[in-house]
Image (spheres, rainbow, N blue to C red):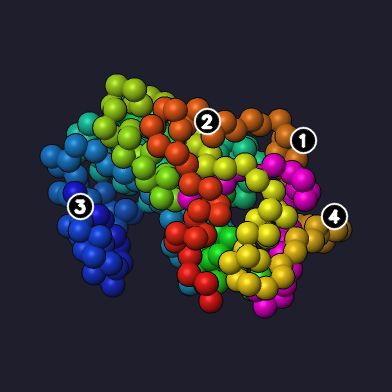
């Protein structure tokens, strides 16, 4: 197994996982091809925030992620990789989310146009997002403020929220590689748990040992793109179907916190 990173400083971290490390840029198909030739599969995860340090222009972020996906998939095609597992995002976000979500539509279409044997993973929110900033990867300010309130596109305290531990996304990807005939050509709306903002706040409060409450942001201050289908609860997520399919139980948020997050 080879783990490819474009950041040389992360090579040691990859090796610590017991994985052979290689440095290559997803934006450079020619550099990727030698690492993909002879591979049984390619798990592709593009990074929408790869250029956040140099610019806050989301148009640049969008163009950059689409380029990552396009070049990486073309490299897979030229290397004749037999199976690509592509990390995308839930259809709810594809239809109504940020521009950086819509990049995944372009990348999925690229895979289809190239005729790749592909399995698409479409997870919703990551459980990791509640303890680390999505872009900066730094701890959230929730413990200091005692309040979990932010723009949420009209979602209320009782709106069912789907999320998943990235560990379980990895396990789903591994299952896809091991079961080619039962996964190729499919797109999976993965979910690990359905919960609410107050329930998440309660679990975090328990972990941090200090009160934490969820406060809805007034509509006049909520500048997050409205996701009417999610707010109206038009989507259905079924945790049980994935547990049955994969043969393992999905990680709950409380389990995620207790296993993978250290208390401050």
Q: State the residue position of label 3.
A: 2
Viewer-proximal residue, 179 or 91? 179
Q: State the residue position of label 1.
A: 232
Q: What span is in magenta?
A: 143-165
Q: Secondary structure at mark 1?
A: loop
Q: Secondary structure at mark 2?
A: helix
Establish if 235 lies above or below 127.
above
Q: State the residue position of label 2.
A: 240
Q: Residue at x 68, y 53 (%)?
A: 199
Establish if 52 lies above or below 122.
below
Residue 243 left/right relative to 162: left
Going from the N terminus, do you reach mark 3 or mark 4 first? Answer: 3
Going from the N terminus, do you reach mark 1 or mark 3 first? Answer: 3
Q: Residue 37: x, y in percent?
A: 15, 42
Going from the N terminus, do you reach mark 2 or mark 3 first? Answer: 3
Mark 1 vs mark 3, CA separation in Å? 43 Å
Residue 178 left/right relative to 52: left
Q: Residue at x 48, y 46 (%)?
A: 251
Question: Is the stretch drawn in magenta largely helix, strand or loop?
Answer: loop
Is residue 235 within the magenta segment?
no
Establish if 150 lies above or below 175.
below
């Amino acid at each position: 197994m080879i783990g490819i990173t474009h950041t040389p400083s992360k090579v040691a971290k990859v090796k610590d996982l017991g994985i052979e490390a290689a440095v290559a840029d997803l934006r450079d198909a020619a550099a990727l091809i030698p690492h993909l030739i002879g591979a049984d599969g390619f798990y592709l995860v593009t990074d929408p925030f790869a250029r956040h340090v140099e610019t806050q222009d989301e148009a640049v972020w969008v163009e950059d992620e689409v380029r990552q996906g396009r070049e990486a998939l073309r490299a897979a095609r030229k290397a004749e990789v037999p199976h690509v597992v592509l990390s995308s995002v839930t259809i709810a976000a594809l239809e109504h989310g940020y521009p950086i979500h819509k990049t995944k539509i372009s990348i999925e279409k690229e895979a289809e146009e190239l005729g790749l044997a592909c399995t698409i993973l479409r997870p919703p929110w990551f459980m990791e997002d509640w303890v680390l900033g999505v872009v900066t990867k730094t701890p959230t300010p929730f413990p200091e403020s005692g309040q979990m309130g932010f723009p949420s596109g009209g979602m209320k305290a009782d709106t069912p929220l789907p999320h998943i531990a990235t560990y379980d996304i990895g396990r789903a990807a591994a299952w896809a590689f091991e079961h080619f005939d039962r996964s190729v050509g499919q797109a999976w709306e993965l979910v690990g748990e359905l919960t609410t903002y107050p329930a998440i706040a309660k679990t975090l409060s328990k972990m941090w040992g200090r009160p934490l409450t969820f406060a809805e942001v007034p509509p006049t201050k909520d500048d997050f793109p409205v996701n009417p289908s999610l707010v109206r609860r038009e989507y259905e997520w079924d945790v049980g179907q994935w547990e049955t399919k994969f043969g393992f139980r999905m990680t709950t948020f409380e389990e995620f916190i207790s296993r993978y997050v250290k208390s401050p």
